[in-house]
Image (cartoon, helix red, strand yellow):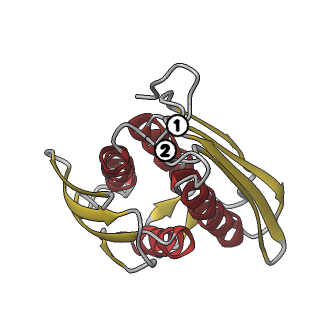
Amino acid sequence: MRTATVTRNTTETKINLTLAIDGTGQQKFDTGVGFLDHMLELFCRHGRFDIELVCDGDVHVDAHHTVEDVAIALGRAFSEALGERRGIKRYGSFLLPMDESLVMAAIDISGRGIAVLDLAIPSQKIGAQFDTELVEEFFVAFARELGAAIHLHQVAGKNSHHIVEACFKGFGRALGQATSIDEVAPNEIPSTKGTII
């Protein structure tokens, strides 16, 4: 079973999470940031990951620390659950429409952490707590902890909620592909170097 448990405590956030990569999309999130919970629920459902995550963060300041630290914990959990990356497909991509919005999500679990976002989100906030600049903070932190190249490119879209939702759904689908076991080479590390981590 490809699972992980991560506990991460700082002066800004206290996070506990469990992850099963080979799940059915069951999830329970309580981060104190409603929009983030909603996006993570969509990510889990579309990636078919089972995740329970509780974060007690300093949301009285703003949502920044919570969003970034949740991404750090999630990226770390996926990294631990994947181990040496043996048998994974490594690459995943998905072109996701969300009403008028269209976002391309792609990932390479390469051992090298980088996030490239080309998004034109019209509003600065979604809801009362979520600054849209935190979308990039989330994916940068996730990419760094997992050791992956993540690309999110907006093809179309005018509604901020729809654009961000397309990012998280598309990323869930792409990550689900990349972490799935390659039936042709289930025991191989997918790199000519012989190692990814």
Q: Does residue 1 appear left or right of residue 120 in this picture?
A: left
At x 62%, y 45%, the residue is 107
Q: Which mark is residue 148?
A: 1
Q: Residues within 10 Å of mark 2 (few under 14, many from 20)?
A: some
Q: Secondary structure at mark 2?
A: helix
Q: Of residues 21 and 138, which is closer to you in this image?
A: 21
Q: Amino acid at mark 2?
A: Glu
Q: Is there any visible trace of residue 128 in the rendered image?
A: no
Mark 2 lies on residue? 137
Q: Quadrant of residue 49?
A: bottom left
| Quadrant placement of the C terminus | top left
Q: Position of residue 68 (x, y in %)?
A: 38, 48
At x 63%, y 56%, the residue is 174
Q: Position of residue 196 (x, y in %)?
A: 46, 28
**Residue 52 to residue 125: above or below:** below
The mark nearer the N terminus, 1 or 2, is: 2
Q: Which mark is residue 118?
A: none
Q: Quadrant of residue 169?
A: bottom right
Q: Of residues 87 and 133, which is closer to you in this image?
A: 87
Q: Amino acid at mark 1?
A: Ala
Q: Of residues 118 and 152, which is closer to you in this image?
A: 152
Q: Position of residue 165 (x, y in %)?
A: 63, 69
